[in-house]
Amino acid sequence: MITERLTDDKVGISRAAEILQKGGIVAIPTETVYGLAASAFDGEAIKKVFAAKGRPQDNPLIVHISNMEMLYEVAKDIPKTALKCAEKFWSGPLTMVLPSNGRVAPEVSAGLSTVAVRMPSNKTALDIINKSGLPLAAPSANTSGRPSPTTASHVENDLDGKIDGIVLGSDCTVGVESTVISFCTNPPRLLRPGAVTAEQLREIIPDLAVDKAVLAEPEKGARVASPGMKYKHYAPKTETYLVEGDSDKFIEFVNSKNDGVAVCFSEDADKITVQKLIYGTADDESTLAHDVFSVLRKIDTLGENKAYIHSPSKTGVGLAVYNRLIRASAFKVIKL
């Protein structure tokens, strides 16, 4: 298959919409990560998405919409609290799991009676949805299990020749996938943390619960309700460890190693004597989120046997970064 490179303008957007309307699959930029889009109503197109990614078909997809009218094309019985969250956080990096109205292809929801929906804020993504006239199911546009793509070149590295098109848009501004909450439980439950934080959500949903899989290993064979809940995900090929401890302990620990790369905060870099990568500053968790997937991809280019990543906090956006890193390391945690 030849993958078309599509420009981030009216011509490219029109071509992307045409491919999607004909049952093709196209990688598109969003504010979180690049998504691999297909019509949410076309089961055969959705199967192409799973095949291109090598993604297990028991892992549901998120449907992307461009307006509130489109929400009712895919969901029903929408709680008032969900509408309040949409009013506050859409368009933006929040996904809501709602009762499906049965119109989306069953492959989208992995056989569940629910559908996960969000409205991205990226203009190109919205323009493509509007031009196609379709809600688009779109997981991250990468090989399943690998770090998510935040640039068009990341998509090319993983999926060139496997998909119909790539929209060459700007780099993603958020850098981690959307927050996912389910309104199909009582109380509503946080399934995956993201840039919309649990603290922000509790202003609307005071009794919001946090699924134990956010920070802990999921049970073997458990059926997941959201993307990003699998055991190992976002992983480099290099053996990776998450290291918990203050900066002094982390610096001492990694400087004692001769078989790995340290992934550190910028304020600690000058004190680290081994090979290192910087993934943002400890005091600004949004910088960690923005760079974490790019750094996870860079690890494999350094030729080291192991990688040791300094753990972020587990609050605010830091929880989203920690959630990705605990899976990238397959839950291998070193506590100092």
Image (tube, rainbow, N blue to C red):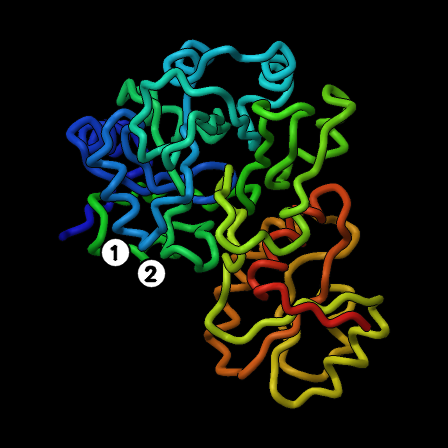
**Residue 123 versus residue 69: which sits nearer the camera?**
69
Other residues around mark 2 within 10 Å, as few (<14) / some (14–19) / many (≥20): few
Mark 2 touches mark 1? (CB < 8 Å): yes
Judge whether residue 255 can be spotted in this image: yes
Q: Residue at x 73, y 72 (%)?
A: 334
For marks 2 and 1, give the CA distance: 6 Å
Q: Is residue 83 above or below residue 17?
A: above
Residue drawn where x is 50% and y is 75% of the image: 238
**Residue depicted at x 35% and y 53%:** 155
Residue 34 image point, x, y percent: 42, 44
Residue 22 pos. (x, y %)? 15, 29
Instruction: Give the residue type that dot 1 points to.
Output: Asp
139 left or right of 165? right
Screen quadrant of the C terminus: bottom right
The residue lying furthest to the bottom in this view is 258
Which picture quadrant has residue 282?
bottom right
Nearer the observer, 236 or 125:
236
- Residue denoted by label 1: 160
Left or right position of 323 against 105 = right
Q: Quadrant of residue 101?
A: top left
Q: Which residue is mark 2?
A: 157
Across and down, in percent, residue 24 comes to: 19, 37
The residue closer to the viewer here, 30 or 86, is: 86
Q: Is residue 263 visible?
A: no
Q: How many marks?
A: 2
| 271 left or right of 32 in image | right
